[in-house]
Image (cartoon, rainbow, N blue to C red):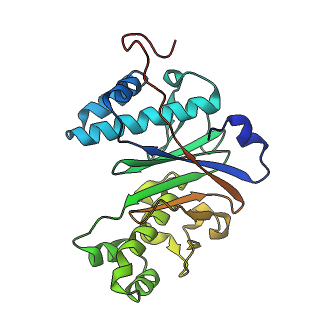
Amino acid sequence: MTTSAHDLATLGAAPIDVWRISLAVGAAHLADYWAILSPSERECTERLRAADQRRRRLAAQGALRWVLARYLDVSPKALRFAHGDHGKPRLADTAPDQGLVFNLTHSGDEALLAVGRDLALGIDLELRRPLGRLDAMAERCLAPCELLYWRALPRAERLPAFFDSWTAKEAFAKATGRGLSLGLTRCVLAPCPEPRLASIPEQHGAAGEWGLWRLDLGAQFSATLCARTQAAQIRMVRFAPRPPPLHPSGDPFP
């Protein structure tokens, strides 16, 4: 499935596309991605010590450029980015939460990229991996009322429930542009199966202005999308990398 900026502009409800991206790509695609990164993006990638980390960052940043270029009908190499006070990226020459907006997350070899228009947007993905100090992590990340609800769950359900809560809180924190500096215990989730914000810091409006959507990526992952709307149409899109150029020495983006 492919989509376009025209699609985003014409739907009635606020449309949000969520692209699912595999970061397990081969050398040919990595070379293709490397060619479109900015010098600063290359430098950040090279600073990572582990080869898997470098591969995943390169694949995520390359796919981000490819997807956004599809909406804007420009070369992926031509895109320029700006960053908010707490590091949230946006397209250069746009105001925060205006125009084509996006948010990227990755965990393991999977990434999600949310794309919308004219709204605050955040997304988070976490691999449900064993945590040696799960109770201590829960105490640091959950508000007291959330902690009571979490501790009442059967022990086998606590790990996935923790990651579900974490991704919901992190998605909201990313949507505000504050990230973890917001303080995860300051955004409180309602005690119900579907994610819903019960209270948030007052500078970000009323909790009811924000929507949360849990994304089903299978039992291995927790993933949540957050947007400053309750009426979003969510579309899941599988990202297919562009085939590598026939002549690797040539410029694939004339």
Determine the residue positioned at 33% across, 27% down: 42
Is residue 193 visible from the viewing direction of this image? yes
Q: Quadrant of residue 61?
A: top left
On the image, the x and y values in percent for residue 161 come to: 42, 75
On the image, the x and y values in percent for residue 226 come to: 57, 59
Is residue 175 rendered to the left or right of residue 155? right
Determine the residue positioned at 52% across, 25% down: 76
Q: Is the residue 125 above or below the residue 28 in the image?
A: below
Q: Is the residue 211 above or below the residue 69 in the image?
A: below
Is residue 184 rendered to the left or right of residue 10? left
Which one is nearer the viewer's eye here, 24 or 195? 24
On the image, the x and y values in percent for residue 2 come to: 62, 38
On the image, the x and y values in percent for residue 75 come to: 55, 21
Q: Is the residue 253 above or below the residue 97 in the image?
A: above
Question: How many callouts does the rendering have?
Answer: 0
Determine the residue positioned at 72% across, 52% down: 14
The quarter of the image holding the N terminus is: top right
Q: Is the residue 144 above or below the residue 75 in the image?
A: below
Which one is nearer the viewer's eye here, 25 or 187? 25
Is residue 170 rendered to the left or right of residue 55? right
Is residue 93 visible from the viewing direction of this image? no
Q: Residue furthest bottom?
A: 152
